Image (cartoon, rainbow, N blue to C red):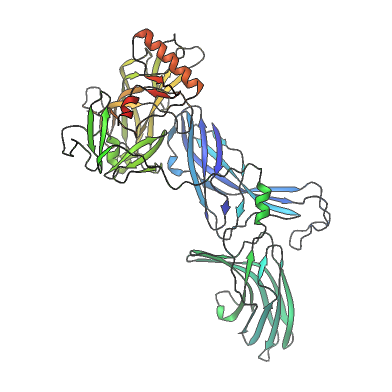
Amino acid sequence: MNVEIELIKYGFAGEETNGYVYMTVKKPTILNMGFVSLSQIDVLGYGNNSACTRSSSHTFSNTISNYPQKIQSQINMFPINISSVGKEFPPGKHRLDFSFYLPQNFPTSYVTQCQSLSYSLQAQMFTSDGKNFSSEEVEFPVLYNHALISSLPLTVSGIINNLFVTIHATQTTLSRGENAVVYLSVSNLSSDINRTLRILLISECNDGSDVTIETLNEVSFELTQSELVNQQVVFPIDQKTCPSTVTPTNSLRHYIVVKMDNLKFTEKNELLALPLSISADAQNVVVEENKGKSVEIKPTYTMFPNVDSVMVSPGIEHLKTTNNSDMFVDHMRRLVCDANGKAIDGIYPFYESTTLKPGCTFGILHNRDCVINHTTKEVMWFKDDLLPQALLQQCENAVVTIQVLEAEGLNVRSAKNVPKVYCCVTTTPWKKSKEVQGICPAFDDTMFFIDVGNNRKNVILYLYDNSSILGDDLLGFVNIDLTKMPFPCAIEGWFEFRNSPLGEETYTGRVKLRIAYDKVRHSAGDVYVHIPDVISCFTKPIYSNSTKMQKQVKNASALCSQAGATPYCSITSNGSVVNKFEQLYQSL
């Protein structure tokens, strides 16, 4: 498995971060869990520079080594699309989404003459066979994205436990890397002169009802006389200090606070606070530092394309069957009807969509799952956050029965090699059928029984060609999605092969199956509801136009011509690959 990670945007303190993880799967894989790990990278020292000193608990010599010291540590792990856990992924390229929230007081990235703070992301995937796969690390700048707090006072005064205290600042809008300079004056209003005052630089993070106060720096003064005039106090603003900000939902503020040594912050009547505004003016430097690196930023698309289906009236769609007859379906009532909307006898063809609200159906656009609202003509990309229908129906021991009947339009190795086809499903161990040779093979007594319980989300049927000593070729697969399929049900119908959503595979053809999703196993003699074989612009497969695909279509067409069969796919005058139902698509 090959794993890649892609960011939609940079990280911003106080905001949500989104991105994608791409998995290129080479064999059927069940995902147990997946994470995106966030690491912090501190780099100390950028060559000989006498300015590289720090007046904190960390001590460095005046001359830093020519070789920077890099310290990397993992600080958090975030789940990847947790609803995909336990799902089987067929060979191909798949995309999972992830998101996480960075707190308002999360330290932002910075670059100075002597040191830097940066972050990286790495995806880690764990499969059911005990293996784990990791992506390369990508740069993850964390920036500041809010306006500065302005109009702050330079002087505040007040009485603290019989002391009249005044704090005066030369400036209250500061940048990281600068010093906050204040002057303290105290007049004692009582005879007790043995007092201890604490002066602190603090941050107050207010995230809804949760308030967090952090002390960034502090000094203490012993009052041994009745008056203190313009005592200078200097607080360095460290580069790791989070910028001040106020949003409609949260805030991060900074203060110089004066209080008695034995008082808590909750006793606000007994303390004095001078607000500060700290900005992150090093942001542009961080962006410049990351230009040209492996930071992949993609725009966020919030609008999805509208697709015009053939609607004779709101909610009623005009379809074609594969034998070129007309069919009208009412998606609001889940009925077959005539052109005027009057119900007639017939099976509603979108059997999976009965688990959605009226008017909506599951569909496929560009080989990606989607949901279509036929009343508003909106198309929404399908998110894999549904639960298995057996679980929703409180069945703990569900069984999937699959009977393979026949197939057509399958890939071939060459224009002379008739495929030897077998079917299999992922269980422990794998279950595999007998081989059947033919360009349109018919399978006799091929049945699979899979105990799926109530937590397995899908079962995939694979068809392989075993006509070469070099190894078996995957011909295609059918993904039986148990989060969509009604429970219980027993259906019969044709299922089209399609590529993975982002892959360039050359799968063609389809297979006729009987599928039962129930509490018990079904047999070949049971009653199955025959689902009409219809043509819709929302179920149309998209084929690759690659050289490999066109060669495959030419070989299959030549083999069909020798056998007197109709080729399943062909190449149009503009080089596109289409199947034999394309004219029906065009007539809709």
List x then y, in percent, for residue 459. Answer: 38, 31
Total labels: the figure holds: 0
| Above-or-below relation of 214 to 317 | below
Where is 253 relative to 582, above or below?
below
Q: Quadrant of residue 571?
A: top left
Q: Can residue 394 be seen in the rendering of this structure?
A: no
Q: Is residue 427 above or below residue 237?
A: above
Q: Residue at x 66, y 55 (%)?
A: 284
Q: Quadrant of the C terminus?
A: top left
Image spot of residue 51 (x, y percent)? 81, 58
Q: Is residue 227 visible?
A: yes
Whole-percent x, y for residue 108 in the image? 62, 56
Depth order, front residue of 311/358: 311
Residue at the farthest front position: 573
- Location of residue 251 by image quarter: bottom right
| Residue positioned 44% across, 40% down in the render | 84
Is residue 155 shown above or below 505? below
Locate residue 389 relative to residue 336 in the image: left or right. right
Q: Is residue 394 left or right of residue 39?
A: left
Left or right of 32 on screen, residue 149: right
Residue 578, percent from left and from top = 39, 24
Left or right of 169? Residue 334 is left
Is 36 in front, or is 109? 109
Please identify the quadrant where the N terminus is shown.
top right
Which residue is depicted at the point 21% across and 27% down?
A: 527
Question: Which corner quadrant of the image does residue 261 belong to?
Answer: bottom right
Residue at coordinates 72% horizontally, 47% vertically from top-left? 70
